[in-house]
Image (cartoon, rainbow, N blue to C red):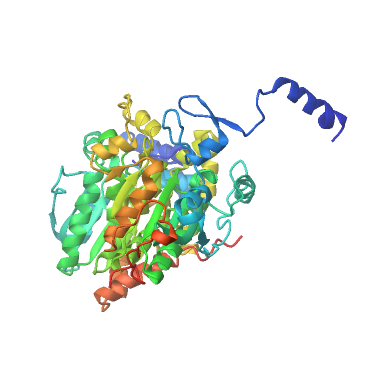
Amino acid sequence: MTQYLDFEKPLAEIEGKAEELRALARQNAEMDVEAEATALDAKADKMLRDLYKDLTPWRKCQVARHPERPHCQDYIAALFSEYTPLAGDRNFADDHAVMGGLARFNDRPVMVIGHEKGNDTKSRIERNFGMARPEGYRKAVRLMEMASRFGLPVITLVDTPGAYPGKGAEERGQSEAIARATETCLQIGVPLVSVIIGEGGSGGAVAFATANRVAMLEHSVYSVISPEGCASILWKDAEKMREAAEALRLTAQDLKQLGVIDRIIKEPLGGAHRGKSATIDSVGQAIDAMLTELDGKDRAALISDRRRKFLNMGNKGLAA
Amino acid sequence: MNWITNYVRPRINSIFSRRETPENLWQKCDDCGTMLFHRELSENLNVCTNCGHHMGITPRERFLALFDGGVFSQVTVPEPVSDPLSFRDQKKYPDRMKAAQKMTGEPEAMLVATGEIGRTPIVAAAQDFSFMGGSMGMYVGNAIIAAAEEAVRLKRPLILFSAAGGARMQEGILSLMQMPRTTVAVQMLKEADLPYIVVLTHPTTGGVTASYAMLGDVQIAEPNALICFAGPRVIEQTIREKLPEGFQRAEYLLDHGMLDRVTPRTELRDELITITRMLLGMPPAVKGDLPKPDMAEPAPAEPETPAKE
């Protein structure tokens, strides 16, 4: 059974009841609960539909952070073949918050890079919850430059709460590492496409998502600051994260309207974690479509397209 | 409005806040507490004459001291869409903007100018920490792009003085998008082989540090400036330990290889002249007062176009 989010509590009760009934029936052959259980299923289904029809920005943040949401490694395993991880920044360490390497996407050799949050306590600690240190960005720079030299398209999968705020990270130049990664994104002469699959947390996300094409999953978020951080600064109260999430316009729908992203990828009913393989398939199709759009463009065109895209960004606000 | 607010309150205030000196003539050093006479302080570029502590300085004050004879011309910055997200926290964003404009007398958090320093033509951009924490929004992005374009057009180096708490949250994702936008501006300079010198001043943090402020050919910081991506409080909360003395200060970054130099504000102008002239292949600047006309030797000729080529 999935882990329910706080706003899904009523749904959890109904689904729990249906499950309970069926469990009882399994023990007692004379009981016929199917009619009742089916009714509950229908009710749950309707409730799920209603809940997800119009998620508030804060609820989207919760869905985007859902621990069972498919992560970078799930996408790589399902969508890429011959994945060959490449490690290290050649200076200090290998950052496990960032994974990447050579792989084939629809048989075409590419470089795939992404943030990985981990999926249990041990791997989350090892992956530092997807919060990269300078080494992670420097590894990404190295891989992007290699891809550019060999003409391999770069695909980035963004899912990070943000760059890691730690002592060593600062001492080794967190800000410089992010700045160089963004610069490298802008410089490489190969197609660069990015998908925000969960959380697009501030500079740590920009460092990977300064791309020719950027797509976002329907319930992922992309923001300059976390709603909690924004609330504690502007509202002086971290508990005002709902208001902050609202004000920040961090949903895929708002970002599309602002021209910051190019496409929204539909998620299954109830979020990506309720239909992992369908989500992964849709992401694969989006990557394929974005790469196709960039086919036939030479190095100079790819670079100047990317630049122009960002220089022109922000020319329009949201319709009031 | 009634007689209480008009008359009684000012009188009460004047009784309780009677100062020994008129306001504004003296300023207390934030660090050592010495009372500094305003004229002396501004002549020393807001650096405490007692302890050398660097206090904030507005872009306009800085440019007046930086450019030869205090002469510079402002570069027009394209106006962005105002309040693109209709952002509202406890106050409306346009109200915060108006308050900042009123307080600083400036339209936004960055000033761009062209002029000469030691007879060396440059473009300069300076961020105004007193304007909403110097925060980087679309205007600041536009200002940096305008500065880079002007530098490329005139074939001049760009000197940028950074000071900011980070990105402007009230512009949401569009403030974040200034990281790639300003990085494009830096690339324009590099492709034109023009020097890009960053002077990091107190404080320079967040998305600003993680973009244009860390991409200079030469990185100079003012003494004791706080320069970081994540602020010390955030880090202490995350790792739950005390940070070392001087952590994330200019000298600490110099020790960790993140900067080329730490230079006091009072010596900065000469240093910038020296560095830009060398990078541009120009002869050394003639320092000191010009000799009297009757004994003047011809000064070394300066090339008409200062940039390479």
For residue A161, above or below residue A212: above
Q: Residue at x 52, y 48 (%)?
A: B61
Q: Quadrant of the C terminus of chain B?
A: bottom left
Can residue A178 be seen?
A: yes
Q: Quadrant of residue B120?
A: bottom left
Q: Quadrant of the N terminus of chain B?
A: top right
Which residue sits furthest top? B16
Q: Residue at x 51, y 58 (%)?
A: B71
Q: Quadrant of residue A25?
A: top left
Can residue A278 be seen?
A: no
Of the pair A23 and B296, the residue shown nearer to us: B296
In this image, B262 relative to A152: left or right?
right
Q: Residue at x 31, y 24 (%)?
A: B241
For residue B230, above or below residue A107: above
Which residue sits furthest right? B3
- In percent of width and height, residue B217 lies at 28, 55
Of the pair A221 and A229, the residue shown nearer to us: A229
Figure disc tally: 0
